[in-house]
C-alpha cells in the first residue's frame, strides 16, 4: 500500500507547480474573456459571451482565422517536404558533412525577429537586395514592391516561415534516420529495389513517428508564431496579413480591448487543443495497426 | 543552498529599495540614442542638488511603451512618473490612473509654457500632464530636384504641388516627386494633411469626417498621385522611417514629417540640398500641420509625489528643456526656451513654429487608437486600389461612428 502511493507523493510537488503555472493563467484568461475589462486589466461587469460575439461579427477576425490556418498548413507542410530530403542528404556520409550540418543548424541560433528584420530590408522595394538581385539577373524590369500588398507579402512570409522552421525539423529527422538500420537498405538493394522504392518502403515508414512529432510541434509553434509577420508588415496593409496572434496583440496592446484579446487567445487555445488531440489519436491508431 | 541564500538576499535588497521613500521611478520613452544619456545626466544633476532623493530612469522603446505601461499598471508595479502619448491621456484619466497636478502647478510654473502645447494635457479644467516633447509637421523638399525641373519655389497649394510633381516627372528625373507614407504609425495622419486642406476634419459634430466630400476629394487626389507614378511605387510598404530614408537617399523629392528629420539629415547626409516649407494648403486656403505632444504624467498610486514633482519642476526649467530639445530635435514648449538663438535663428525650425497657430492635434476622444486604425486601413485599401473610394470611406466612417457612440 505504502509502496504504491510513493510515485504519487513524489509526483505531487511537480504536479502542483505545473498546475500553478498552467492553470492559473488559463483561469485568468477565461475570466478576462467573460468580463468587461478596461485597458489596464481591471475587470468590471460580467458580460458572458459578448466578447466572442463581437469577434465573430468582425470580418477582420474571421479573415485572420482563415489566414492563420493557411499560414500554419503552408509553413508546416512546406517545412516537412523540404526537411525530409535535406535530412537524408545530411545523413549520407560525404566529405564536409559536419560543416554542412552546422550550416543548416546555424539559422536556428539567430533570433526570429532579427531574421525578419533582415528580410524586411531585403524585400524593400527601392533599396532591397532581392529586387536588385533579380534586376541584375534580368528577371524583372521594374522593382517589385514585395511588402506593399498581401498577394506578395504573405507568400514571402510563408517562405521565410518555412526557412526558419527547417533547422529544428531536420534535427528531429536526423535523429530518426540514424536509428534506421543500414542492413535493411542492403537487403532491399539485393532484392533489386530502386532508390525511390527504398525511400517509400523503408525510410518513410520508419521515419513516420518522427514526422508525427515534427508535425505536431511545428504546428503549435507556427500557429502561435508572432515575429515574422509583426516585424515585416505588422499584419498590414489593412489587416491583410494578420494572423490570429498579431491580431490579438493589436487588440490587446494597441486598442486596449483586453477582453476581446483574451477571447481570441482562448479560441486559439481551443483550436490547438482539438487539433493536437485529434492528430495524436489518429497517428497512434495508425501506428498500432 | 547557496543559491537560496542569494535569492533571499536579492529579494531583501529589492524590498529595501522599495521601502526607501526617496526613490522616484521614471519611465522614459526612447526617442533616439540621445534620450537615455540625457535623462541619466539630468537625474544625476538633480540628485546632486536634492540629497536623499534618488531618480531611477527606465528607458523603453516607443513601440513597447504602451504595452509596458499596460502590464505595469495592471500589476500595480508602475513607476511614479512616465512619458505617454498625449493621445492616450484620456484613457488614463478616465480610469483614474494618473493624478491631477493642479496642487503643484502654480501660476508662475504654468507661465513657462507655450499655451498651444500645454492645452492638450488639460482635461476637465485640470492639468494631468506636462508636454515633455512637442513637434509639428512640415514639407521637406529636395532643392536640386526642384531646380532641375525648373521650379523655383516649393508649392503652396495642392494644385501647385500636383503641377510641380508632373513637371518633375516629365523632366525625366528618376526621383519620385511625392514621398507618400502608407504603413504603420501615422498612415492616417498623412491622409489628414489633404483632408484639412480640403476643409474637412477628422471628427465633425461628433461624427466621423471620413465620408465627407473633403475626404473623398483627398482620396482621389492622393490616388491620382499614386496612379500617375508621382509617388514611390508600393506606398503601403513604406513606414514613416522608410519615406524619410527615401528622402535622405534622394529618391523622393518631398516628404511631410517632423523636425527631427533635420537632426538626422545633419548627421547622415549633410550635403543634401533640402528646404523646409509649410504643408500645401487647399485652394480655399485651408490646411494646417499636425501637432503632437507627449506628456509626462504622475501616477495616482505614487508614494513619492512631492519628490516626483520636484523632479518635474527641474525637467521643465528652461535650461533642461533646451538641452533635451536640442538632443531630440523637438520644438520648444517653453516660451523662454523658444527665444534661445538655437531655435529663434534656425530658419528651418521657424517654418515649423510658424505653423503652430494652425496646428491640429489628435482629437481627445475615447477609442482614438481604434479610430486611427480604421482610418489607416481604409486609406491603405484605397492606395492599393482595393474597392471604390467612396464606398471604402463610407464603410470606415460608419465603423468610426460606431466606435464614437460606444463610450
Image (cartoon, coloured by chain):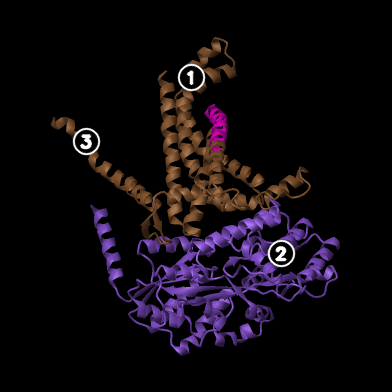
| Farthest residue, direction top | A191
Give the number of the disc on residue B218: 2
Q: Residue at x 39, y 77 (%)?
A: B308
The chain ID associated with circle 2 is B
Q: Is residue A24 above or below residue B368?
A: above
Q: Which chain is brown?
A: A
- The residue that disc 1 covers is A182
The chief SS type of the magenta part is helix
- The residue that disc 3 covers is A8
Residue A84 magenta: yes
Which badge, 1 or 3, comes first in the chain's sequence? Answer: 3
Across and down, in percent, residue B66 comes to 47, 63
Residue range of the region highlighted in magenta in the rendering? A75-94
State the image quarter where residue B225 is shown.
bottom right
- Distance from the alpha carbon under mark 1 to that under mark 3: 42 Å
Question: Could you say whether the residue bearing mark 2 is in a helix, strand or loop?
Answer: helix
The chain ID associated with circle 3 is A
- Distance from the alpha carbon under mark 3 to that under mark 2: 71 Å
Q: Residue at x 34, y 45 (%)?
A: A22
Q: Is residue B94 above or below residue B381?
A: below
- Classify mark 3: residues with Cα within 10 Å, few (<14), some (14-19) or many (20+): few
Across and down, in percent, residue A152 comes to 66, 45
Across and down, in percent, residue B345 comes to 66, 85
Give the number of the disc on residue A144: none
Question: Could you say whether the residue bearing mark 3 is in a helix, strand or loop?
Answer: helix
Circle 3 or circle 2, nearest the eye: 2
The answer to whether residue B129 is left or right of residue A85 is left
Q: Colour of chain B?
A: purple
Marks 3 and 2 close (CB-CB < 8 Å) = no
Residue B179 visible within the image: no
Question: Could you say whether the residue bearing mark 1 is in a helix, strand or loop?
Answer: helix
Do the residues at discs 3 and 2 belong to one chain? no
Amino acid at each position: 500500500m505504502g509502496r504504491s502511493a510513493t510515485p504519487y507523493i513524489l509526483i505531487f510537488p511537480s504536479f502542483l507547480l505545473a498546475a500553478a503555472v498552467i492553470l492559473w493563467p488559463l483561469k485568468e484568461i477565461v475570466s478576462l474573456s467573460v468580463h468587461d475589462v478596461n485597458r489596464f486589466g481591471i475587470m468590471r461587469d460580467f458580460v458572458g459571451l459578448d466578447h466572442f460575439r463581437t469577434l465573430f461579427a468582425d470580418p477582420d477576425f474571421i479573415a485572420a482565422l482563415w489566414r492563420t490556418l493557411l499560414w500554419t498548413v503552408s509553413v508546416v507542410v512546406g517545412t516537412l517536404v523540404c526537411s525530409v530530403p535535406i535530412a537524408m542528404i545530411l545523413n549520407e556520409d560525404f566529405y564536409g558533412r559536419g560543416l554542412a550540418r552546422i550550416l543548416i543548424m546555424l539559422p536556428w541560433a539567430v533570433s526570429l525577429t532579427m531574421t525578419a528584420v533582415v528580410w524586411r530590408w531585403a524585400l524593400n522595394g527601392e533599396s532591397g537586395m532581392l529586387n536588385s538581385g533579380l534586376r541584375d539577373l534580368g528577371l524583372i524590369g521594374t522593382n517589385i514592391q514585395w511588402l506593399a500588398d498581401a498577394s506578395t507579402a504573405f507568400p514571402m512570409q510563408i517562405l521565410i516561415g518555412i526557412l526558419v522552421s527547417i533547422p529544428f525539423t531536420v534535427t528531429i529527422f536526423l535523429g530518426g534516420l540514424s536509428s534506421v538500420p543500414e542492413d535493411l537498405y542492403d537487403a532491399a538493394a539485393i532484392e533489386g529495389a530502386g532508390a525511390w522504392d527504398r525511400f517509400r518502403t523503408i525510410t518513410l515508414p520508419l521515419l513516420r513517428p518522427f514526422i508525427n512529432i515534427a508535425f505536431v510541434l511545428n504546428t503549435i509553434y507556427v500557429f502561435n508564431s508572432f515575429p515574422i509577420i509583426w516585424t515585416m508588415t505588422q499584419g498590414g496593409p489593412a489587416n491583410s496579413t494578420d494572423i490570429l496572434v498579431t491580431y490579438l496583440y493589436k487588440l490587446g496592446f494597441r486598442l486596449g480591448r483586453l477582453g476581446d484579446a483574451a477571447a481570441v487567445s482562448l479560441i486559439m487555445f481551443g483550436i490547438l487543443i482539438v487539433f493536437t488531440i485529434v492528430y495524436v489519436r489518429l497517428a497512434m491508431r495508425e501506428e498500432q495497426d | 543552498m547557496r543559491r537560496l541564500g542569494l535569492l533571499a538576499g536579492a529579494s531583501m535588497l529589492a524590498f529595501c529599495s522599495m521601502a526607501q521613500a526617496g526613490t522616484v521611478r521614471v519611465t522614459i520613452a526612447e526617442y533616439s540614442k540621445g534620450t537615455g544619456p540625457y535623462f541619466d545626466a539630468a537625474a544625476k544633476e538633480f540628485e546632486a542638488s536634492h540629497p536623499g532623493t534618488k531618480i531611477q530612469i527606465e528607458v523603453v522603446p516607443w513601440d513597447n511603451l504602451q504595452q509596458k505601461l499596460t502590464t505595469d499598471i495592471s500589476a500595480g508595479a508602475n513607476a511614479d512618473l512616465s512619458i505617454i502619448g498625449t493621445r492616450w491621456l484620456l484613457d488614463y484619466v478616465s480610469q483614474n490612473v494618473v493624478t491631477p497636478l493642479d496642487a503643484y502647478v502654480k501660476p508662475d510654473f504654468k507661465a513657462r509654457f507655450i499655451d498651444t502645447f500645454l492645452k492638450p494635457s488639460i482635461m476637465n479644467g485640470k492639468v494631468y500632464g506636462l508636454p515633455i516633447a512637442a513637434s509639428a509637421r512640415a514639407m521637406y523638399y529636395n532643392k536640386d530636384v526642384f531646380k532641375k525641373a525648373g521650379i523655383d519655389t516649393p508649392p503652396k497649394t495642392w494644385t501647385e504641388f500636383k503641377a510641380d510633381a508632373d513637371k518633375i516627372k516629365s523632366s525625366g528625373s528618376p526621383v519620385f516627386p511625392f514621398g507618400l507614407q502608407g504603413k504603420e504609425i501615422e498612415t492616417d495622419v498623412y491622409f489628414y494633411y489633404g483632408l484639412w486642406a480640403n476643409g474637412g476634419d477628422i471628427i465633425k459634430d461628433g461624427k466621423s469626417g471620413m465620408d465627407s466630400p473633403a475626404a473623398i476629394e483627398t482620396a482621389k487626389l492622393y490616388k491620382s498621385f499614386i496612379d500617375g507614378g508621382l509617388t514611390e511605387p508600393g506606398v503601403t510598404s513604406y513606414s514613416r522611417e522608410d519615406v524619410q530614408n527615401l528622402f535622405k537617399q534622394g529618391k523622393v523629392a518631398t516628404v511631410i514629417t517632423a523636425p527631427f528629420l533635420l537632426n538626422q539629415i545633419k548627421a547622415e547626409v549633410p550635403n543634401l540640398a533640402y528646404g523646409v516649407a509649410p504643408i500645401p494648403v487647399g485652394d480655399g486656403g485651408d490646411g494646417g500641420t499636425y501637432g503632437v505632444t507627449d506628456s509626462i504624467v504622475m501616477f495616482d498610486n505614487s508614494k513619492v509625489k512631492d519628490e516626483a514633482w520636484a523632479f518635474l519642476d527641474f525637467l521643465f526649467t528652461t535650461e533642461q528643456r533646451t538641452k533635451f530639445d536640442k538632443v531630440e530635435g523637438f520644438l520648444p514648449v517653453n516660451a523662454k526656451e523658444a527665444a534661445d538663438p538655437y531655435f529663434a535663428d534656425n530658419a528651418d525650425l521657424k517654418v515649423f513654429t510658424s505653423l503652430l497657430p494652425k496646428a491640429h492635434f489628435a482629437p481627445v476622444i475615447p477609442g482614438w487608437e481604434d479610430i486611427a486604425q480604421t482610418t489607416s486601413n481604409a486609406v491603405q485599401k484605397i492606395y492599393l486600389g482595393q474597392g471604390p473610394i467612396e464606398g471604402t470611406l463610407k464603410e470606415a466612417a460608419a465603423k468610426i461612428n460606431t466606435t464614437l457612440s460606444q463610450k
